Image (tube, rainbow, N blue to C red):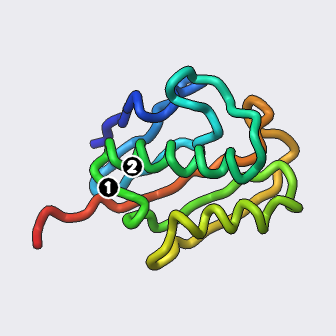
């Protein structure tokens, strides 16, 4: 059984998909980009500013699903320019301070709405058992 995750604290999808899907104890997020959920507009800041907003959007989706960045086991980062890797990585490291998830990073020709970075993740919902 699967169910959709939707929160107003993250941007509305820009196509026919959900912010995330819960399947069993797993959460699979859609890729998040630098869209401000307040107005659903892309921020045109630096790659660092965009990455911070992407991570905040991912955090909001995960919270709605009942987990957090601490529960993420895998991420995929799509970047417009591999030259930005170090700058994105520095911001990313601010959000994953414990055991870092497995990760893939891919340079792509173009991202939705011409943003500089997109990140998706897979997380495990923590057990309610202590």
- For label 2, the residue is 62
Badge 2 marks a residue whose secondary structure is helix
Q: Quadrant of the N terminus?
A: top left
With respect to residue 34, does 99 lie above or below? below
In percent of the image, x 32 and y 55: which residue is there? Answer: 67
Q: Earlier in the sequence, mark 2 or mark 1?
A: 2
Q: Nearer the viewer, residue 26 or 39?
A: 39
**Cβ atoms at labels 2 and 1 below 8 Å apart:** yes
Residue 91: x and y, percent? 64, 62
- For label 1, the residue is 67
Q: Residue 50: name its quadrant.
A: top right
Residue at the top extreme of this rendering: 39
Please give the count of numbered marks on the rendered protein.
2
Q: Is residue 127 left or right of residue 92?
A: left
Q: Quadrant of the C terminus?
A: bottom left
With respect to residue 109, does 39 lie above or below? above
Q: Residue 89: name its quadrant.
A: bottom right
Badge 1 marks a residue whose secondary structure is loop
In percent of the image, x 31 and y 37: which residue is there? Answer: 3
In percent of the image, x 69 and y 33: which residue is there? Answer: 43
In percent of the image, x 51 and y 29: which residue is there? Answer: 37
Mark 2 and mark 1: Cα distance apart in space: 5 Å
With respect to residue 53, does 44 lie above or below? above
């Amino acid at each position: 059984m699967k169910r959709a995750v939707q929160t107003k604290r993250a941007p509305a999808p820009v196509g026919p998909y959900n912010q995330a899907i819960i399947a069993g104890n797993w959460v699979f997020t859609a890729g998040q980009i630098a869209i401000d959920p307040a107005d659903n507009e892309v921020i045109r800041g630096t790659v660092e500013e965009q990455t911070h907003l992407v991570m905040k959007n991912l955090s909001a989706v995960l919270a709605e699903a009942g987990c957090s960045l601490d529960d993420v086991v895998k991420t995929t980062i799509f970047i417009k320019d591999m030259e930005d890797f170090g700058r994105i990585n520095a911001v990313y490291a601010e959000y994953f301070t414990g055991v870092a998830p497995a990760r893939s990073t891919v340079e792509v020709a173009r991202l939705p709405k011409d943003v500089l970075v997109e990140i998706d993740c897979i997380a495990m919902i923590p057990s309610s058992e202590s």
